[in-house]
Amino acid sequence: MLSGIFSLRRALLAICSLGLLASCVHKKYDTPITKNTQQPDKVLFDQAMHDIEHGRYEVARISLQTLMNTYESSEYMAKAKLAVADSWFREGGANGLAQAEAEYKDFILFYPAMEESAEAQNRVCEIHYNQMDKSDRDWTQTLRAETECKDLLLQFPNSKFAPQAAQRLRSIQESLAEHEFVVGNFYWKREMNPAAANRLSALVDQFPLYSRADEALFEAGDSYAKMGPRFRKQSGEMFARIVRDYPTTARVDDATKRLQDMELPVPAADGRALARMKYEHENYRRPGMFARTTSWMRSSPDVSRAAKQGSPTMTDPRRTIPASIPVPVNTEASGSEAGGSAVGTTEVTASTPGANSALDTKPDARSAEGSAAAGAQSTATAQAPTQAQAQLPTNRDKELQRLAKERARKQAAIDKKNKKKKGSDETQPAAPAAGAMPNQAPVGTQAAPNQIAQPSVATNPANQTTVAPTNPVGPQ
């Protein structure tokens, strides 16, 4: 029985051996390309992706660089270039992020029509957005992030990354507006009214979605009110904007009261502004207790109050001039009405002077007549300044008042001291001069008639000439 089993196994083994031998001898050679094998460029790309996923960024970049240098017409060329940028982005650090930004910019330059270009631009915006500092610190990265997010919205407005970039831009502008508000509030607290009004009003014009725009407008209106009655119109406009454009904020009641005190009309609330403010209030998410407690440890700004709706500002800020600076006469009306940001004329003309020119009719300033006329005119101007010049406010009004009070106090102390010294001198008798005789009058006082020494007269017998003494005694 056992022998039969062993013989059967031997037979099966022999049959299998013959079958394998026959297959080796008669198998047809097939090229690997006709089979379902991977191409070498795809092998390199897949290996690089595997290395990136496991943190081997340098090895992955070597594989990707080999792919791009060896297979210039590969379908993975663009993906490999984007993967190189992604490897630097994942590696992080100052050097890694700088290299990633450069690679993303190169990808957008070489492949501007691909969908991945919007993704590359979004990554550049994210790089600077994650490096933003608080509003009271260096804002270089904040400005760079704003520029890159604007470029994404302008170049790829229909991209799937556009809504995310718009929200980032609103958060970025919240931080920029907070920086401007801190500076303007500093001026307002120290009663530097022209600087405060200029800074705060320009802030709301540039960033109308700012969460504390009502506070900025109120401080700007208060600064204009302190600058005198000639700025009553600007002050009323600031308070009216609070009631009209920010109807649900805390400063509405204060602005309404100020308008009533100034006897100016109180505008009605704008419907779209009211709907937007309600939406912001309903969608506000207050940071948690842990986030509020550890906020001082983070370097990134707090943008929890950034707007969730509305179009962010896409234009660069304008340079504004304080309203207290007089506008040149030749300034265009449109520029003067736009916050005083216009400039004077730059045209230069030349002409040949005639016989009735100012050089002939007016006296030369170098002559005595011209100098006297110019001096008289400057003296009259200094003594009688115009009303506009006398009423122009400055940023140092409070400081100048303090210095004037201090100067007056010092002068009063000096006058009091001199008066006291003069009174003590009058109560004490004058002491006689050193070396004077008892009957001799002190210097500076008139002597009695019997104490005046009569001058002696010498007579020359030859010609009877009277010679006066050269050293008379007594008052001259």
Image: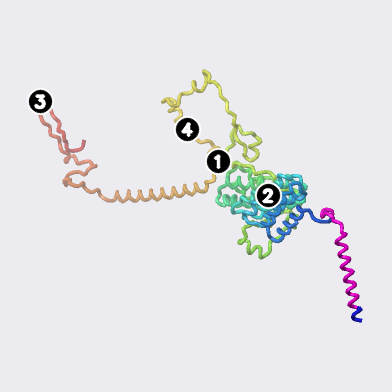
Q: Residue at x 53, y 35 (%)?
A: 386
Q: Nearer the viewer, residue 323 or 151?
A: 151
How would you rate the neighbour count of disc 2 (Cα within 10 Å): few for under 14, some for 14-19, many for 20 or more?
many
Q: Nearer the viewer, residue 464 or 357?
A: 357
**Residue type at tag 4:** Ala
* SS under mark 1: loop
Q: Disc 4 or 3, which lies upstream in sequence? A: 4
Mark 3, residue position: 464
Q: Disc 2 or 1, which lies upstream in sequence? A: 2
Q: Is residue 4 left or right of residue 178?
A: right
Q: Residue at x 43, y 26 (%)?
A: 366
**Residue type at tag 1:** Leu
Gap between marks 4 and 2 measured at Cα: 69 Å
Q: Disc 4 or 2, which lies upstream in sequence? A: 2
Q: Disc 3 or 2, which lies upstream in sequence? A: 2
Gap between marks 3 and 2 measured at Cα: 122 Å
Numbered mark located on residue 380 in the image: 4
Residue 443 lies in quadrant: top left
Residue 292 on image: x %, y %: 65, 63
Q: Is residue 381 magenta?
A: no
Residue extent of the magenta highlight: 5-34
The answer to whether residue 232 is visible is: yes
Mark 2, residue position: 103
Q: Nearer the viewer, mark 4 or mark 3?
A: 4
Numbered mark located on residue 392 in the image: 1
